[in-house]
Image: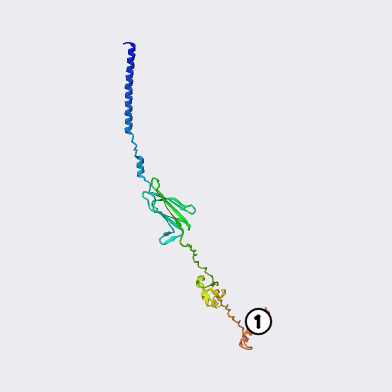
Amino acid sequence: MNKKTAVIGAAVVFVLLGVVVLTLYLLQGQQDVRSRADTETPIPTEAPSQVTQTCPVPAAVQNVQVEFPNCTGDICNFTEASCSWSSVAGATKYQLKITEVDTGRVVKDEQVEAAIIRTVFPIIQGNTYKCDVSAINSCGASGAIGTHSLLCKADAAVVTPTPIPPTVAPPQADCGFPCSSNDNCKTGFICATGTSGQGLCSIPSLESVCQASPSISSCCTAPTAPPVEPTSVPTPIPTLPPTGSLGNILLFGVPAGILVILGSILLFL
């Protein structure tokens, strides 16, 4: 075997070895792909349709009704109207919008819970109001809008009654002030009406005097008794006994004798 044959044989061997190695590599790659495919969770192709089936769009709101005036039992308020509607299956909330058609002013724009199917709103008589209601489900999807409009106008003009202020009792007068009954006088006084028809608050004990001559002094001042002067006792005047009587002798003779005796004693000293 010459040198050329040896080279060709070596080349064939290397090619065969390369084919074998490549074949083993490809087989290993296929096994890895199959292994990964077995461990991964398959994504269902029907997922979008399943989501749509579990959360359908709510139906349109039916029987939307604006009513005026707003009545509770037999009592009606002509400054308010109401909007009501029928409940929708699957709704968790309602989107509510009330508009004053004449001016475009939005009276209400809010979401309410599914348990609420009626709302009250203020109105101006002679204007038209529109109520729009749509149902919203738990996924946030909104259904078709139900709507109704109404001209809020009473058949006759509504007159707002003027509030009557509470009755305030007049202040009670003191003694001597004019009155028409005992209720006008303070506690402890009565109303004494004279012949002229004029009444004055009076002390009860002076009613007759006050009626005869109505005045502050006669109705309120008790008459004072005149001061009682003490009875004067005359000073007793001593009476002298008649001349020559025993009394005169004793009255004048005894002192004179005493003086004579005293004078004699002084002369002998």
The answer to whether 262 appears left or right of 117 in the picture is right
- Relative vertical location of residue 79 with respect to residue 30 in this rendering, above or below: below
Please report the residue visible at 32 percent of the width from the left and 28 percent of the height from the top. Answer: 30
| Residue 1 lies in quadrant | top left
Q: Which residue is mark 1?
A: 259
- Relative vertical location of residue 175 with respect to residue 23 in this rendering, above or below: below
Three-letter amino acid code at the position of disc 1? Leu
List the single residue furthest toward the right: 267
- Residue 107, percent across and down? 47, 53
Q: Nearer the viewer, residue 29 or 220?
A: 29
Please report the residue visible at 32 percent of the width from the left and 21 percent of the height from the top. Answer: 19
- Residue 128, percent across and down? 46, 55
List the single residue furthest toward the top: 2
- Relative vertical location of residue 59 with respect to residue 72 in this rendering, above or below: above
- Residue 242, percent across and down? 63, 88
Q: Quadrant of the image for the C terminus? A: bottom right
- Residue 175, percent across and down? 54, 72
The answer to whether 111 appears left or right of 39 in the picture is right
SS for callout 1: helix
The answer to whether 135 appears left or right of 228 in the picture is left
Q: Nearer the viewer, residue 263 or 254?
A: 254
Q: Residues within 10 Å of mark 1 (few under 14, many from 20)?
A: few
